[in-house]
Image (cartoon, rainbow, N blue to C red):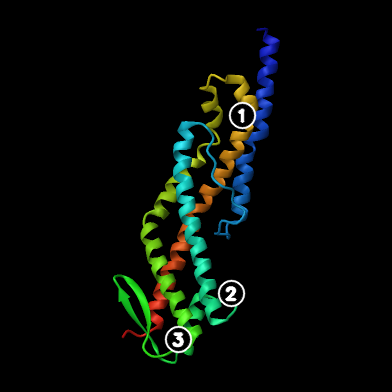
Amino acid sequence: MSASFRSSKWFLVVAVLLLVLGAPGDALAKKKGKKGKKGKNDLPDVELVGLDSLDDVFKQLRKLDKKVSSAEKEVNKSQRNLNTALGIKNDTPVKKGLAQLQKRAEGKVSIATNGNVPKLEATDAVPKNVADAIDAVNTMATSFTTALSDLGDAVKESEQLGKKVSKMPASVKDEFMKDSGGFFNLLFKLPKTVKAVNGNLKVALSLPGRTTAVVGKMTNIVGSITSTFSPL
């Protein structure tokens, strides 16, 4: 192989790398620009890239992302269900919804515990919307308590995964060079892989904040249920 061909080949590789490896900084800048957003909106799905050393971490990331996303959806669904039962605006905070339920129940709803799960009970006949709201609150309390148990170490885990994934964009080229595909892998597979890694990095960077936020919301709501109603 002539020196000029080798030179041209590596010039092309470098050009491709410069094009695609600029993305990690862009992804990080975009993430920093959206620091206040805690939800899953605009975040991609976690992708596997066909490199075992990276995919072992991405599988953990995908599992945790799904767990946190499920908890976020549960918070939103539970809020809607309570507000729908009471006939109030869907974006009404749960704490205000609980206050509305207490007011409409006119002292006919009290709280007990089922294990460590708070449970509302009607002590007398109540209107249907109040009964439906009681069911919504009890479903919420059960699902939140279960989710909080499941998310016990999630904040710490998300921070550890974020550190691991943050190092990956710089190591992708080296992982490809270990493969027998060599130059052609660099040229044709690397751009797609780097794009997937950058997307996964965006998810990883979001997880500590999202996890902290959803755990905090669920904890506060369960506390509000307990503090709003008097025990039997």
218 sits left or right of 25 in the view: left
Residue at 58% from the left image edge and 59% from the top image edge: 37
91 sits left or right of 165 in the view: right
Circle 1 residues within 10 Å: few <14, some 14–19, many ≥20: some
Disc 3 marks a residue whose amino acid type is Gln
230 sits left or right of 69 in the view: left
Residue placed furthest toward the left: 115
Could you say where residue 63 lies in the image, as x and y percent from the top left? 45, 48
Could you say where residue 34 lies in the image, as x and y percent from the top left? 61, 56
Task: Locate the N terminus by quadrant.
Answer: top right
Residue under numbered circle 1: 189
Question: Who comes first in sequence, dot 1 or dot 2?
Answer: 2
Residue under numbered circle 2: 90
Residue at 47% from the left image edge and 56% from the top image edge: 68
Residue at 40% from the left image edge and 72% from the top image edge: 222
What is the secondary structure assignment of the residue under circle 1?
helix
Label tally: 3
Q: Nearer the viewer, mark 1 or mark 2?
A: 2
Q: Which mark is residue 102?
A: 3
